[in-house]
Image: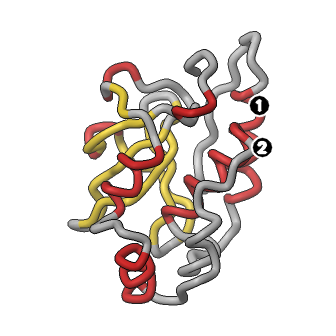
Amino acid sequence: MVSTCPKSRTQSARPLALQRYLDACEDKVFNWGTFDCCLFVADWLNVVNGVDVAADFRGRYKTAIGAKRRLTRLGFSDIQSVFKHHLKPIEIAYAQRGDIALVEFEGELVGGIVCMNIVYCVTNIGLSVLEMSAVSSCYSQVLPDLGGAHG
């Protein structure tokens, strides 16, 4: 069973939105092109920002090779180049609940969502929890061209 993020009383509705999003993802099965690490992150960014950063990517591949081909067609070399293009980098130490992370998992970088000293990711077994020590880089959940306060 996946642990949940502790609930916090803040002025923002994001912690509750994040918990609802994670709850909705808990029983989903990994599936290239519909529920994989990149689309897990993109769907969260859509909840937070109302923008689908994966519109050109979503549903256009069904395998790891197909995902790589689609990335190449869109002008990206890897998942990190996609994140750097769409998101604002932040220091790992300043990552807040709901921010985005690239995490080392089985020798690959996978996208995830930061939550209270852990990162939720989608792996081959579905929604997984990884330690912050596995984080390679972090990005703000607020899309750069939308502005607004962080967090």
148 to the left or right of 20 = left
Residue 47 occupies which quadrant of the picture? top right
Report the residue at 77% width, 43% height from top.
20
Residue 34 seen from this side: yes
Q: Which disc number belongs to residue 20?
A: 2
Report the residue at 70% width, 28% height from top.
15
Q: Which disc number belongs to residue 111?
A: none
Residue 69 occupies which quadrant of the picture? bottom left
15 to the left or right of 125 = right
Q: Amino acid at mark 1?
A: Leu
Report the residue at 25% width, 44% height from top.
136
Residue 98 seen from this side: no
96 to the left or right of 80 = right
> Which structural element holds mark 1?
helix
The correct choice, above or below, for 88 with respect to 64 in the image is: above
> Which structural element holds mark 2?
helix
Q: Nearer the viewer, residue 39 or 72?
A: 72
Q: Amino acid at mark 2?
A: Arg
Expressed as whole percent of the image width and height from the top left, the position of residue 54 reads: 59, 62
Q: Crowdedness of circle 2 by 10 Å Cα count: few (<14), some, many (20+)?
A: few
Residue marked by disc 1:
16
Q: Are marks 1 and 2 in contact (CB under 8 Å)?
A: yes
* Quadrant position of the C terminus in the picture: top right
